[in-house]
Amino acid sequence: MSMQVIVSCDYLVSPAFCDSSMLSEKVSDLIAIKRELDDGGNKVIIESDSLAKLSELELYPCTQIFNHNIPAELRTEFAPKDIAAIVRSIASMLVEDDECLLPECAGEWNSIALNPQLEGCKFERFVPLTKLVEDVFLASQIHHKSLSILHHPLGAQTNAIKITGELKHSVPELSDEFPIALSDEVKIYSTYPRFLAQFNSSDMYQQADTPAKIHAAIMIGAATILQRSGNSELQKFSFGENFIESLHAHQCAPGQKFSNTAFDVICHVIASLPKYPHNPMYSDLNKKTQKKKNEALGWRTQITKGNPALRLMYWSKDDTIELANVGNKKELVIL
């Protein structure tokens, strides 16, 4: 059964309402969601007519909305103009793949109850959010899908909505015998990594046949590690132009001898929870000056101990990582 998450309108504008400690997490989530959609993935569904709904709430994702709520001291790192552009891009993406749309269905209920109710960024969102939860629940039942919701704000203990009711009839028909008593939960996630942690990232990596799929597997693997540790903020990361080639050259690419070991080490690096010690890459024989590239610092860490002894090289600046290359221990080359 495929697992998908529906991103609520409220989540799209969450950086405008969350406190400074959560801001980086929410922006990172939006970037990861946009990348998933750009890469043609089918894990994410955006609430329909998001831009129109936000406009009606006077929350159209423009610079002023985020500029008003993001503290001045954080606007250098999280430019309101850039956040607004990301949100508009996500909300306005045209999706042609049916797998990235909430399956169409309709139902009439004799009775239905939700516990707890979802709260929105504004009071006017109460009815649309109730309808969204009902639609997700009904689509899950009729189309046998594992559908959940990514939403903000959420109460501290809210991780699912319990739905109980008696369905009078539905389109498509759920059964030949109506009415039907139904009771189940819709899972609610407060962060994208918590949703991603459900996936088997190792299997995804082994089956990856493009850089985009390798990137997605690493992101999910790192999210799973973060979830187990109780953290949720993923670092942004990219591949250097030689990274994929070096994976293949050193038997670390999907399906190769050291693929599982390399994947585990890489995911721990992206999760900022190192598997092994990380050592600076030096530019001098006296080991006094760490290598730099555009203010990013060069690092290396162990992948394998034996023959060959492989190392992962990467560049790091603030909360961003560029995976440079895999190499042998004695090469000491970061590309």
Image (cartoon, grey):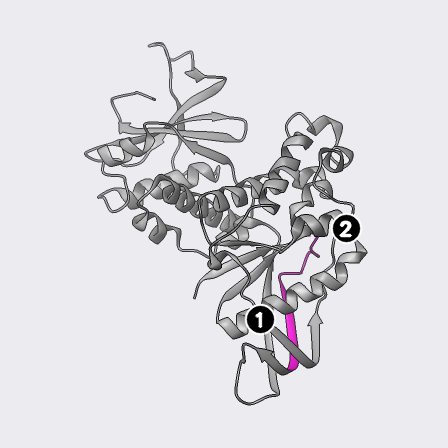
The answer to whether 59 appears left or right of 238 in the picture is right
Residue plotted at (32% across, 47% down): 208
Q: Quadrant of residue 120?
A: bottom right
Q: Residue type at mark 1: give it.
A: Cys
Magenta stretch containing residue 62, yes or no?
no
The answer to whether 256 appears left or right of 97 in the picture is left
Q: Which residue is mark 1?
A: 105
Vertical placement of 281 versus 132: above or below?
Answer: above
Whole-percent x and y of residue 215? 40, 41
The answer to whether 7 appears left or right of 243 in the picture is right
Image mark for residue 17: none
Viewport quadrant of the N terminus: bottom left
Task: Determine the residue located farthest toward the bottom in the rendered image.
Answer: 177
> Mark 2 and mark 1: span between their CA atoms?
25 Å
Whole-percent x and y of residue 334? 34, 22
Query: Secondary structure under badge 2?
Result: helix
- Crowding around mark 2 (Cα neighbors within 10 Å: few <14, some 14 to 19, many 20+) is few
Of residue 264 and residue 164, the one placed in the foreground of this image is 164
Residue plotted at (36% across, 39% down): 211
Residue plotted at (40% across, 55% down): 200
Task: Determine the residue located farthest toward the right in the rendered image.
Answer: 123
Q: Which residue is mark 2?
A: 56
Residue plotted at (50% across, 46% down): 37
Give the mark nearest the N terminus, 2 or 1.
Answer: 2
Counting the numbered discs, the total is 2
Viewport quadrant of the C terminus: top left
Q: Over which residues does the magenta segment extend? A: 152-167
Q: Residue type at mark 2: give it.
A: Glu
Vertical placement of 71 versus 2: above or below?
Answer: above
Whole-percent x and y of residue 147? 54, 63
